[in-house]
Image (cartoon, rainbow, N blue to C red):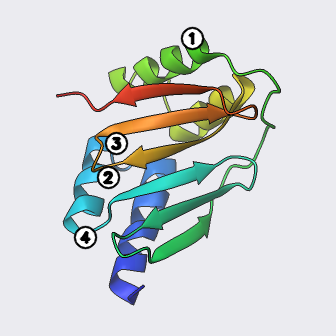
């Protein structure tokens, strides 16, 4: 992957963790740079960004605190997504990560093409969120 795209992906990762960009702003930057999606792996504490040709960039995430609970609670994951969408005053991406791991979320896949996010647990249970219209 070229250096410019890697820099854009890293900027978006850092901006999410620092609260500098919203999810829609991050999606816009990544789509404009040609990415088709990304994956968050809470067990590896990493995030991978994908181009349509299969090329990818992998980065370690900051804030590794907490482990993934054994039981996936889809209702709790959905409530946390709604919290993030409201951009509540107490929201941060780091807090979201800690809380969603406690709800059993091992990671999630964001598909720009499919306009959805698939959250999954350690037993491959899922919760699917469609992008707001």
Q: CA distance from mark 1 to mark 4?
A: 33 Å
Badge 1 or badge 4: first in the primary sequence = 4
Q: Residue at x 62, y 37 (%)?
A: 97
Say what secondary structure mark 4 lies in. Answer: loop
Q: CA distance from mark 4 to mark 3?
A: 15 Å
Image coords of residue 49 (percent x, y): 46, 64
Q: CA distance from mark 3 to mark 2?
A: 5 Å
Q: Residue at x 59, y 14 (%)?
A: 76
Badge 4 or badge 3: first in the primary sequence = 3
From the image, tell me which residue sits under label 3: 23
Residue 63 horizontal side relative to residue 5, left or right: right
- The residue lying furthest to the bottom in this view is 2
Local packing at callout 1 (Cα closer than 10 Å; few below 14, some 14-19, many 20+) is few
Circles 1, 4 touching at the beta carbon (< 8 Å)? no
Image coords of residue 105 (percent x, y): 66, 32
From the image, tell me which residue sits under label 1: 75
């Amino acid at each position: 992957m070229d250096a410019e795209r890697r820099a854009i992906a890293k900027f978006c990762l850092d901006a999410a963790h620092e609260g500098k960009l919203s999810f829609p702003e991050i999606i816009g930057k990544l789509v404009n740079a040609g990415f088709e999606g990304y994956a968050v792996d809470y067990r590896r504490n990493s995030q991978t960004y994908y181009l349509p040709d299969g090329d990818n960039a992998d980065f370690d995430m900051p804030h590794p605190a907490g482990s993934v609970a054994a039981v996936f609670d889809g209702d709790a994951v959905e409530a946390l997504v709604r919290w993030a969408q409201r951009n509540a005053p107490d929201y941060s991406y780091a807090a979201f990560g800690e809380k969603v791991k406690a709800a059993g979320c091992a990671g999630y896949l964001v598909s720009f093409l499919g306009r959805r996010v698939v959250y999954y647990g350690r037993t491959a249970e899922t919760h699917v969120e469609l992008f707001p219209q």
